[in-house]
Amino acid sequence: MTLPTKHSPTKHAPNTDAVNCWVAVASAEHVAVGRAGGFMQVGHGKGAPLKRLHAGDRVAYYSSVRVFGEKTICQAFTAVGTVRDGLVYQDEMKTANGEDFKPFRKDVHWFESQEASIRPLLDKLTFTAGKTNWGYAFRFGLLKVAAADMDLIESAMNAVDWR
């Protein structure tokens, strides 16, 4: 896979009706692996949820914890980018304990960005505003959100698209 050539930085273009916005959920550690590889996974490698995403869709990751299976709290948006194409594919890898794992993935162009705590955004995001149990929105691992919410997330992350 070749990475895009870096030119002058630009903010992501405003959303259009043909583009959807999504928040996926994974540990910060797993998100870092996906960023490094230029892909995303959801639901512990399930393929069906990824079929909802299309080329050009905007996606951010929310990480409640730093490491999967541990309790070190993160509660931050940890990656943001755009889906490269509509292809959902299956890959092979080994888990941390050496077991074979064949997750489904989708390629993503990840923006340069900084981690951003969700706390300052809770009253501004439409899917968390006014909700005491705001984490409930993330329970299925992939959440369709409004373009205005994605704009807030990208802004909080100081996201820059180098394409």
Image: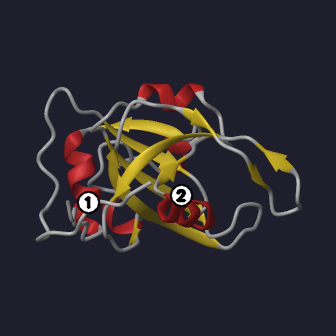
Picture disc at residue 72: none
Q: Residue at x 16, y 27 (%)?
A: 17
Q: Secondary structure at mark 1?
A: helix
User: Please, what is the three-letter code of the amino acid marked with disc 2?
Assistant: Gly
User: Nearer the viewer's eye, disc 2 or disc 1?
Assistant: 2
Residue ID for mark 1: 154
In the picture, measured across the screen, residue 2 lies left or right of residue 7, that is right
Q: Residue at x 36, y 36 (%)?
A: 85
In the picture, measured across the screen, residue 119 lies left or right of residue 90, that is left
Q: Residue at x 72, y 46 (%)?
A: 92
Foreground residue among 156 and 97: 97
In the picture, measured across the screen, residue 45 lies left or right of residue 153, that is right
Label 2 to label 1, Cα distance in Å? 18 Å
Residue ID for mark 2: 34
Q: Is residue 43 above or below residue 4?
A: above
Q: Residues within 10 Å of mark 2 (few under 14, many from 20)?
A: some
Foreground residue among 32 and 127: 32
User: Please, what is the three-letter code of the amino acid marked with disc 1?
Assistant: Glu
Which quadrant is the C terminus positioned in?
bottom left
Q: Residue at x 38, y 41 (%)?
A: 22
Which badge, 2 or 1, comes first in the chain's sequence?
2
Q: Is residue 134 visible?
A: no
Residue 33 in percent (x, y) is at: 58, 63
